[in-house]
Structure formats: structure tokens, C-alpha cells
Amino acid sequence: MVHTFAAIDVGSFELTMKIFEYGGRKQMKEIDCLETGLSLGADTYATGKISKEKVEELCKVLSHFASVMRSYNVENYRAYGTSAIRETENSQILLDLIETRTGIHIDTLSNSEQRFLDYKSIARAGDVFTNAIQDSAAILDIGGGSIQISLFDEDSLVSTQNLRLGVLRIRERVESLGADPYRMRLLEEELIDAQLLTYKKLFITGPVRNLIVMDDYVSTCIMRKAGGKGTGYLSKKEYDALLDDLSEGGTFELARSLDVPEEKVPLIRISGILVKSLSNILRCEKIYAPGVTLSDGIAYEFAEENKIIKPGHDFEKDITACALNISHRYNGSRSRAETMRQICGTVFDAMKKVSGLTDRDRLYLDIAAILHDCGKYIAMTDIGERSYEIIMATEIIGLSHNEREIVANIVRFNHSEFIYTGNEGTDNGTLGKEGYIKVAKLTAMLRLANSLDRSHKQKLKEVKASLSDGELKLHVSIPQTFLLEEAFFPEASDFFEEIYSIRPVIVRNRS
């Protein structure tokens, strides 16, 4: 039986809907794509709100999308808004208005969620992604409001950073200076170079051979030059020649030759400058443009969740790698983090059947274990609060803002007194009831792990856990004194028992 799915991207410059078909062989195939130019970001970045006229146009386009979905008998869809919606001051009112008038529910992606979906869309391109990240590689994800640069080395995510250098934002900023066209180009280049040089000083340690470009602007030009979608790449020399061609022609002539609206040409040029500047800094040899969009990432995620496809890449490993690099940046101890992760994982698995927690919650606990004391970098006092501030101020690719807040609170309450909320006359803050309960349950596990390595000397050689008769038995093998851990364990055990009504006990096996 054949099923259909629609992926809708409400972007800063364009609205895109892709229709996918999937059936017995469990593969998703794109069967239609609708694109409409609508510069929502120009309003948002300039005034903080989308004008009434553009809201009317947005609703008209989405109503058409809804009609097309009905004609395809679409069974499931997902619609996401990116920075133009995310940064609009009245976003909740706007989204309610859109759903009332069009019937389409739009969820707003945080930057880290958006970039993670973009990253998945590149993975959907297959060999381009797989082959490139086997060596040193960078993904440059260019949006209207910002760019994301993710560095890989030998198939592992090394770092990811967001910079407010989106093509629309740059265009609006430079236009506000009132420069003539020639000076505008020079200002755009200077603005881009200034921020990328700062990025280089902080994060680049050596050459990066491959650059994968994802955008709605210059990628099309790269693909044409390389021979078509997903078929190849350009050498650095070939790319520089392409950019020279894009810089020479007038706006009208380029719009005709590229078959794009005139208003898109300046954005293509800015995107081209971003690629050139970063490729110079990284000393890249090859530049790839897989020709995928956020809509492909939305479809990939849907297929992954519904087991339509089997992922060829471990994305959760990349989230963990991101957390490990944050820990390294703040001088976290790798050996202690690994000990905390091992104990937390053992406790979580033993409690899984009775805790009501999911595999996603296990990931939160794992990240909290990695970042459990990152606040020490700022001050040795109030470690919980300082750690909370670092985590909330640092994007972790793949986690939403709400998920990051869950992790930050687990780490906070590992060091400080747990705050009880939800009683009469109080609420659970931005976490909500479900998030608050998750934080309590996972904090109890992290505190237990922390108490078992209180000396920070990784005394435990092995920890096994079993659940029986209302007790969580922790079987430990230790070759040396365990006095400090045994002294702090009862306090952590009391809190754990309060949360789960199960008492942790140490079963000690001497070496």
C-alpha cells in the first residue's frame, strides 16, 4: 500500500512543500515540490514583525499547499517555521492566525533543531555526506538569519557554531548603511570576513579538505557547474571561477541566466561570498552541494521515526560528541565524565521498566553526566548555577531549547537543593509538569552516580545494578578505600528513594 507525506518549510525567503511517497519497500520518494518566494525575513530582521500584507500572502500560499495535499490524499504532514517565524515578536499569535485560516499547524524550530534537520537532509543525500565526513569536512548551512558551521573529523562531529551571518540579515544590515552597489559588495565581504576570522581563531586548528554547502541560494549554481544534483563537486579553483562569473554580470542578466527572480540574485552573491571566505579559511580542496533542503530533513526524520528507513549514520552520537566538545572547552575531566556516564547508564537501564523514562531521556542523562560540573570553569562556588548558565547559553545541535533546559536543570540540581514546584499556588515554570518530573527523576540518578565517585578518583572498576524487593542493588568492585563515597551515598540514596520509592544499596565486592 502506498502512503503520502508532506514536508513544509516556512523559510525566511521561500516557502517550500515537498510531497513524498512511501510503500511496501519502505523507501521515501519525492513526487512533487512546490516553491514560492516570500521574503518574510526582510520584515522580521528589520522591524521584529511580519507585515499584514505578507501575512495575507503567507496564508494564501499555505491554503494552496493545503489544497495540493488534499489532491494527493496526504496522510501525514509536518510544517516548520525557521528564523523569520522564530524571531517574530508575536509568533504565537501569528501561528494561531495561520492555523485558523489555513488549517495548517506550524511548529517553530529552534536554531539547533533546524540545523539538525538540515544535517539529516544532507545525510539523506547518501554517498556525498558519507564520503566527505570520512575525512576532515565542514558543513556550511546558510540561512536567511544565520549560518551554522559544523566541523567533522574521521566521521565524528568536532564542533558546531552558529553565526548571525544569514544572507537576508547581511543584506538588510548593509542596505541600512545607504551605500552604493559597489561599496555594498565591499561592505558585505568585510562584514563576512571579520566574523569568520574570529571564528577561525577560536575553532580552526588545521586544514579541512571538504566543504559541504547547504542553502537555497548558491547551491543551485554549484550543482549546475558540477553536473547536476548530488553527482559531484567543484575544486576550489573551479568554485572561485564560478564566483567570478556571478560577480561580473548585472542583476537582470544573472536572473535570466540562472532562471531566478531578480531579488534573489543579491542573496546568491552573498551566499557565494560566504562559501568563498570560509573555504579560504579552511583551506578546502573540494566544495560539495548535495542539493537538499530542510524539507528533505523533515521527511528523513519522519521516515526514521516510523521505521520507513534505517539510518545510515548515528545522529545521537553527534549530539553526544557536541556535549563532549563543550565539556572540553570548559576544561571538563574526560575520565570523570566517562565514569559518571557509565554509572548513570547502568542505573538508568536497571530502572527503565519502572521509571517511565524513554531512550530520549537516557540521552538527556548522558549529556548531563558529561556536563555535570562545567560551571567550575567560571567559579568553584555556585557550580550548579554557573553550569546551568553555560548550558543554556550554548547550543547543542539536535536538542530543542526545552530539551536543553531539562539537561541544564538536571546539572543544576545535582549541585544544589532541589526546588519543589507544582504545589497549590505554584507552577512548573517553562518546563511544564512533564519536564519537571523528568528533571526530578534524572537528577536522582545523576546524584547517585556523583556520590559513587565523590573523591573524583574513579575508584569503581565496575558497577552492575539489579532491581529486587524494592531495592536497587549496586554491585561494585573497588580495590581501595571507599570512605568518602560511602559517607555521601546515603544522602543521594534518600533523594532517589523519595523520587522512585526504591532504596539504592551498595553491595561491595572486594578485589
Image: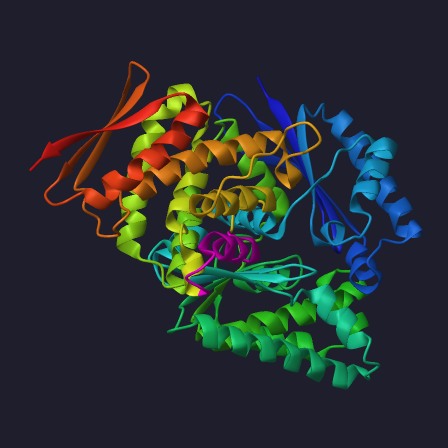
Q: Residue furthest left?
A: 511
- Residue 133 picture location, percent across and down: 39, 56
Q: Residue furthest right?
A: 53
Does the magenta run of residues contain 383?
Answer: yes
The correct choice, above or below, for 366 with respect to 88 in the image is above
- Is residue 441 toward the left or the right of residue 336 in the image? right
User: Residue at left 83%, top 59%?
Assistant: 43
89 or 139, which lies in front? 89
- Is residue 227 toward the left or the right of residue 180 in the image? left
The quarter of the picture where residue 134 lies is bottom left
User: Residue at left 61%, top 30%?
Assistant: 433
358 or 188, which lies in front? 358
Pick the quarter of the image with the N terminus. top right
Q: Residue furthest front?
A: 487
User: Residue at left 70%, top 60%?
Assistant: 144
**What range is drawn magenta here?**
378-396
- Residue 23 picture location, percent across and down: 54, 23
User: Residue at left 68%, top 71%?
Assistant: 269
- Residue 505 picture location, percent across and down: 26, 27
410 or 404, which lies in front? 410
- Is residue 290 toward the left or the right of residue 154 in the image? right
Pick the quarter of the image with the C terminus. top left
- Residue 370 picture location, percent across and down: 38, 49
